[in-house]
Image (tube, coloured by chain):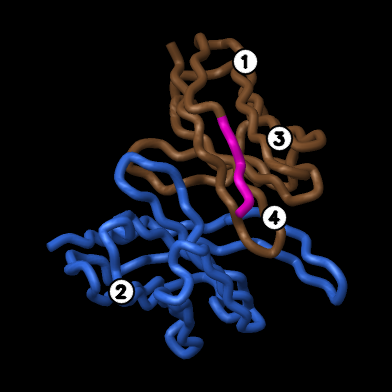
Chain colours: A blue, B brown
Amino acid sequence: EVQLVESGGGLVQPGGSLRLSCAASGFTVSSNYMNWVRQAPGKGLEWVSLLYSGGSTYYADSVKGRFTISRDNSKNTLYLQMNSLRAEDTALYYCAKDFIVATNSHYYYYGMDVWGQGTTVTVSS
Amino acid sequence: SYDLTQPPSVSVSPGQTASITCSGDKLGDKYACWYQQKPGQSPVLLIYQGNKRPPGIPERFSGSTSGNTATLTISGTQAMDEADYYCQAWDRSTVFGTGTKVTVL
């Protein structure tokens, strides 16, 4: 079964750090394009970060320089290292797999087809 | 930054048609997707590439794109379709729309 399971959320003080994990089963993280998406309480979805299968990384302006996306191929797990946390980073954090077919000259995008259940991060003193 | 604008809310009577718009600069040149999110649940992919449904998505959900606007249409709306709906634009990275709450009255 294709599945994503997030963990690592919790309560952290402003300025603190946290590392989120997203364990995948049924597919290989390193062969796919993987995202972190967050949702603040009562708010909409906000894309946070993307890790290409080739290793390129992209970040939303709101987290650039503070968050780092990475993966451990041996554990088939995606990570999000979050530093210098702020109150506005409080949210439910989802990992999600992009379904992309990439050729030499083009990307064909089929949407975020697998989502985890999310892990909650609360930044508060 | 790139922004996608959706109406905050749409109301529809059971059995009627609901339409949700998503507006963004040159949205038709990007890959447009739609997601449904029910309370306490993770988002579910409804539409990709503007008008295609993944396996298992009911035919009453359809999508279209023209110019700067993508539209999600729910035909014969059912009570179970009451949810939040988000558009997404992909052009090597992702932007989500502001979200629309659909209420089935």
Q: How many other residues sit within 10 Å of disc 4, few (<14), some (14-19) or many (≥20)?
A: many
Q: What range is drawn magenta here?
A: B1-6
Q: Looking at this view, is B25 or B58 the one in front?
A: B25
Q: Are marks 3 and 1 in contact (CB under 8 Å)?
A: no
Using the image, name the chain to which the residue with label 4 belongs: A
Q: Which residue position is annotated with label 3?
A: B70
Between label 2 and label 4, give the one nearer the viewer: 2
Q: CA distance from mark 3 to mark 1?
A: 16 Å
Using the image, name the chain to which the residue with label 2 belongs: A
Q: Amino acid at mark 4?
A: Tyr
B75 lies above or below A19:
above
Q: Amino acid at mark 1?
A: Thr
Q: How many other residues sit within 10 Å of disc 1, few (<14), some (14-19) or many (≥20)?
A: some
Quarter location, residue A30: bottom right
* Residue beneath the point at 64% across and 29% down: B21
Q: Which residue position is annotated with label 2?
A: A84
